[in-house]
Image (spheres, rainbow, N blue to C red):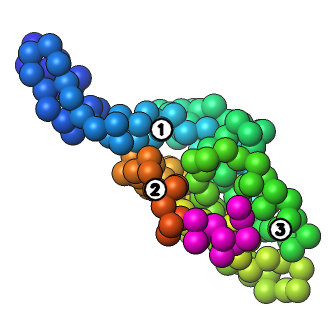
Amino acid sequence: MEAVKSKIEVVGAPAGVEGPGFFATSLDNVVGMARKNSLWPLPFATSCCGIEFMATMAAHYDLARYGSERLSFSPRQADLLMVMGTIAKKMAPILRQVYIQMAEPRWVLSMGACASSGGIFDTYSVLQGIDRVIPVDVYVPGCPPRPEQVLDGIMRIQDLVQKESIRRRKGPEYKAMMASYGIE
């Protein structure tokens, strides 16, 4: 029983060196693990994808088991922007402002065909993908995507968060990408 207990405790630990009474790892690994398991999503839902997100939050799928149960409706208290549904061109500056108001590090999940590519609405008034206004980290396909797909998207964001270096956001590549969007 003791061997099983020790294996369970080590499963969630980052890679490192351990011995009797100590565990050593890099700061990147510790910060990545902490960020991965404590994402604070801000849902920006405009249509039917928002309903699927609500199903994902409900008891059957339970997004809380991934450390994302604390929804934030203030951009200043969120680190994951989940854009769901059709985004009109008039909403693009607002979406961009919400993104800018979020503190670094911040990640974006584009959920559904409408947010990712404009969906079936190839019209003058619909933004043909939010990546024209803000950078997107993970795309969740579907119209609307099933809760299982949303959970997969969250897990992909968690993988990105855990592997991201704490120095990445200070690098020239990241600054160039943000400059290409006219941010900072």
Q: Residue at x 70, y 36 (%)?
A: 77
Q: Residue at x 63, y 67 (%)?
A: 178
- Pointer 2 local density, CA inside 10 Å: few below 14, some 14–19, many at least 20: few
The image shows residue 23, relative to residue 59, as above or below, that is above
- Pointer 3 local density, CA inside 10 Å: few below 14, some 14–19, many at least 20: some
Where residue 12 appears, x then y in whole percent?
29, 32
* Pointer 3 residue: 92
Residue 54 in sight from this viewpoint: no
Residue 175 in sight from this viewpoint: yes
* Pointer 1 residue: 35
Q: Residue at x 40, y 41 (%)?
A: 32
Q: Residue at x 86, y 74 (%)?
A: 89
**Residue type at tag 2:** Arg
Magenta includes 178? yes
In the picture provided, is 9 more to the left or to the right than 63?
left
**Residue type at tag 1:** Arg
Of the two numbered discs 2 and 1 in the rendering, the one whose residue sits closer to the viewer: 2
Q: Quadrant of the C terminus?
A: bottom right
Q: Quadrant of residue 96?
A: bottom right
* Pointer 2 residue: 168
| Label 2–label 1 contact, CB within 8 A | no
Q: Secondary structure at mark 3?
A: helix
Q: Secondary structure at mark 2?
A: helix
**Residue type at tag 3:** Ala
N-term-proximal mark, 2 vs 1: 1
Start and end of the magenta stretch?
175-184
In the picture provided, is 122 more to the left or to the right than 1?
right
Q: Secondary structure at mark 1?
A: helix
- Mark pair 2, 1: CA separation: 14 Å
